[in-house]
């Protein structure tokens, strides 16, 4: 053990020497322990997560150093040394192991460690203690873009749809912790941009923070879903959380989540097993308006967002807001806003261009 520590300090000191370019310092330090990038086959990086270190068959051609709390990196180009006995490491306090591809250039060393770390943290996605190899990167930009668009127009149904799709990608093993890290900070960015500060949500800065906070990706997804639904709930004319009557709060919450669907007072009555007239009384008492006016207010508010933030036709917006008849939608919209949908859009764009 003492010999290993001396070797580690010697190699690290060589890495820190300032008389050689960074890539040359990396290569010289590795050559000191007979790990050569340019040797046939190149160098492979490993990362283990856990308190204990890995044991290789031939440690002479393998260099280990600590890269964080309970996290170690290893370099070797001895193919025999790359063999890790499954039963051996499972007995140790090691959660998972990540392995990079072989590299043959010193400038790719740090990238190889990053790849091995991402692979090791696949435990966050699968929950399985095992050895993970770095996989080809999958594109996740389109889903993020779709989610952002749905968030900007406060379309809870589409947000749920895209969240379910993202969750499926994780379940299928198509996304890794880097994707989870980007996704988490993207959602937090949405909320901060919207001045939502519930529980003082903040960005995370590395994979370990994400791993320590949630343990597994399912927990992260549940947390983000709750945050988004709570934020969107605050933008309805009457937030369910502000209602004192517990029974009516549940009714209002249901309407706030489903107002784009075809839901009548009778539908709500059957769902909550209560007389429709009693629901009408509760609406008037708690909100000051009747059920139809409340539902209309929700739908027209959403239609305004679509007119301002999308290029969808009035006909499509009519359908998306629960109105099958475009002419009826236009009539209701003008009654509530003083303008037809087309006039409202033109007026908004004119105002936006003069700002």
Image: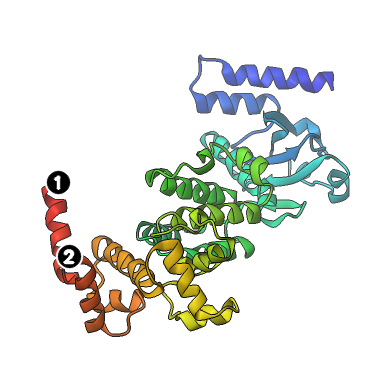
Other residues around mark 2 within 10 Å, as few (<14) / some (14–19) / many (≥20):
some
- Look at 14% across and 68% down and name the residue there: 343
- Look at 86% across and 40% down and name the residue there: 92
Placement of 350 over or under 324, stated as above or below = above
Horizontal relation, residue 233 to residue 355: left or right: right
User: Under tag 1, what secondary structure?
Assistant: loop
Placement of 336 over or under 103, stated as above or below = below
For residue 344, the mark is 2
- Look at 61% across and 51% down and name the residue there: 220
Residue 295: quadrant of the picture? bottom left
Residue 298 picture location, percent across and down: 36, 67
Residue closer to the observer: 344 or 36: 344
Residue 278 picture location, percent across and down: 51, 75
Horizontal relation, residue 342 to residue 219: left or right: left
Q: Would you say residue 99 is visible in this rendering?
A: no
Give the number of callouts: 2
Q: Which residue is mark 1?
A: 355
Residue closer to the observer: 331 or 227: 331
- Look at 24% across and 67% down and name the residue there: 311
Residue closer to the observer: 214 or 346: 346
For residue 128, the mark is none
């Amino acid at each position: 053990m003492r010999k290993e520590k001396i070797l580690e300090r010697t190699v690290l000191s060589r890495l820190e020497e300032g008389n050689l370019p960074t890539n040359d310092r990396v290569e010289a330090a590795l050559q000191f322990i007979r790990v050569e990038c340019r040797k046939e086959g190149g160098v492979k990086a490993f990362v283990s997560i856990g308190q204990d270190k890995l044991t290789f068959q031939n440690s002479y051609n393998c260099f280990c150093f600590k890269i964080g709390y309970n996290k170690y990196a290893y370099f070797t180009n001895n193919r025999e040394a790359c063999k890790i006995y499954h039963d051996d490491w499972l007995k140790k306090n090691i959660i998972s192991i990540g392995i990079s591809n072989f590299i043959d250039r010193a400038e790719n060393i740090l990238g190889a460690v990053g790849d091995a770390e991402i692979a090791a943290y696949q435990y966050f996605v699968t929950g399985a203690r095992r050895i993970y190899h770095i996989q080809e990167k999958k594109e996740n930009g389109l889903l993020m873009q779709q989610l952002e668009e749905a968030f900007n127009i406060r379309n809870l149904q589409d947000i749920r749809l895209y969240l379910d799709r993202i969750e499926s990608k994780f379940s299928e093993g198509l996304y890794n912790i880097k994707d989870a890290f980007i996704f988490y900070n993207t959602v937090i960015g949405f909320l901060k941009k919207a001045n939502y500060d519930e529980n003082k949500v903040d960005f995370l800065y590395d994979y370990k923070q994400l791993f320590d906070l949630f343990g597994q990706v399912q927990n992260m997804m549940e947390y983000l879903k709750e945050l988004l639904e709570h934020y969107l709930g605050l933008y309805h004319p009457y937030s369910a959380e502000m209602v004192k009557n517990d029974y009516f709060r549940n009714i209002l919450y249901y309407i706030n989540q489903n107002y784009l669907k075809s839901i009548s007072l009778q539908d709500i009555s059957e769902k909550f097993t209560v007389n429709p007239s009693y629901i009408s009384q509760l609406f008037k008492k708690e909100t000051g308006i009747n059920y139809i006016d409340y539902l209309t207010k929700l739908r027209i508010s959403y239609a305004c967002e679509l007119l301002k933030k999308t290029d969808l036709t009035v006909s499509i917006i009519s359908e998306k807001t629960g109105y099958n008849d475009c002419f009826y939608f236009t009539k209701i919209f003008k009654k509530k806003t003083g303008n037809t949908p087309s006039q409202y859009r033109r007026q908004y764009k004119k105002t936006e261009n003069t700002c």
